[in-house]
Image (spheres, rainbow, N blue to C red):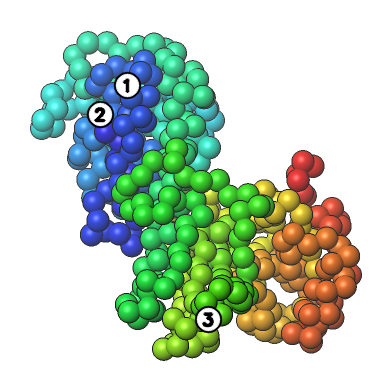
Amino acid sequence: MKIIAAQHPLFRKNGCPVAPESLNKVLLASGLPENAFHLRFSGKGSLLFWSEDFPSFLREDLPLDAMEIFLEEVESWSLPLDRGILERFREMLSKESRGGVVFRVRRRHPYPEGRCGLFFRKVEDGFHYVLVGPEKGEIEVDAILNTPFFSRDDLFEPPCKAWLTFLDDALLTNVAVGTLEEGIPDAHLPAFDIRPVRVPPGEGFLEGSPGETPVPSAAAGLVRWWGTVLEQAEREKEVRVHATIRCGRVLPVLTVSADVRSLSTIGMSGFRKVLARMSFRTLEAARDFSWSLRYRYVDGWKEPEGYAKEWAPVVLEHLVEESGLITLLPLRATRKDLPMVHRKTRPDEPYFWSLAQERLWIALRGTDLEKARSIVSPSVASRMSLKVEPPVSLQGFARMSGVEIPSGM
């Protein structure tokens, strides 16, 4: 059995990513019958993956937002007298964490008529379906639901989550690298040091294993943007510029470093535009479709409004995990100020805006209250000519904005 991931809209010409063999082995050892087929949808109904032998007529030509269409196809396969059973199945989806039904199906090549079992379990992001049959004998619902696949959360979900997250990491890395290659002349590309943050260097989109990916930390040396002079004996001074590309200003995708001499043809401003395109395209790729929850926070980002306050717990949790220390800088800002705010905040500064309060908060990584007060506040005030209020902690932001921040953050 092979598990095959849905294609991302940007990579329709590529083959579908295939799960590592280790994940397929977990499924084979999960206690389900040999003729069990798998299909998973996200919470929004997007098709995420299927098992290789899943009946093609139930998944063929499914669009990305496909769960309802899939259920309709199952109903059309079933005998009319059993359609009420599938209505009961739909009710289970809204009320239960797992369940299943058995129904009769008509012959459809290459599958004979007989009984099918359709089972589901709710997962962190959506629904995992298991189809058993068709077969002439009985299918015991309780026997299927008591298998390790349905009764244990630690068997399939952890490696499955790691694989789906790896696909997102690899996709955004490929998008960012491809955008850089479009913007930099081929002759100068060898002078660029490109380092993916979560995907091993050199891994292709369909290659690699999630078990091999490095884990970023506060000590990983993720840079913002600056020039560094390196003194080396018997050589000219080498001046390099560095940047970290982030998806939606939050999670890092890759770092880029280049000798300024390699930028002679496009200049520093041209390089900044390439970096901006890299950030924009990773954001758009994650918005179009994602297999995992890691980058789903981008659904809350709008330009120039920034992140809606409701997305603050998710965004801030990512920031805290990376840098450990987060301070927020409040500004008084009306809607007409937002284009300027978006233009003059840095690519690693997510912000939140409240229409009711006409107030905006910029999230500052690795910055304590004193540094924010003495260094960042004057800089932001000079950049934007807006009223800057005293910086606040996460708890202060929660009180000001009315957003509930998890206690462990």
Locate residue 181, reporting x and y percent: 36, 73
- Depth check, mark 2 against mark 3: the one in front is 3
Locate residue 58, reporting x and y percent: 24, 39
In the displayed structure, does residue 213 sit left or right of residue 303?
left
Question: Which residue is label 2 attached to?
Answer: 1
Asked if 129 appears above or below 243 in the picture, the reply is: above
Locate residue 54, reporting x and y percent: 24, 33
For image coordinates 24% across by 21% down, the residue present is 35
- Depth check, mark 3 against mark 1: the one in front is 3
Amino acid residing under circle 2: Met
In the displayed structure, does residue 242 sit left or right of residue 364?
left
Asked whether residue 67 appears in the rendered view, the answer is no
Quadrant placement of the N terminus:
top left
Question: Which residue is label 1 attached to?
Answer: 28
Question: Which residue is label 3 attached to?
Answer: 236
Within 10 Å of the Cα at label 3, are there few (<14), some (14-19), or many (20+) other Cα atoms?
A: few
Amino acid residing under circle 1: Leu
Asked whether residue 326 appears in the rendered view, the answer is yes
Circles 2 and 3, Cβ within 8 Å, touching? The answer is no
Q: Nearer the viewer, residue 79 or 147?
A: 147
Label whose residue precedes the other's in the sequence (2 or 1): 2
Q: Nearer the viewer, residue 255 or 296?
A: 255
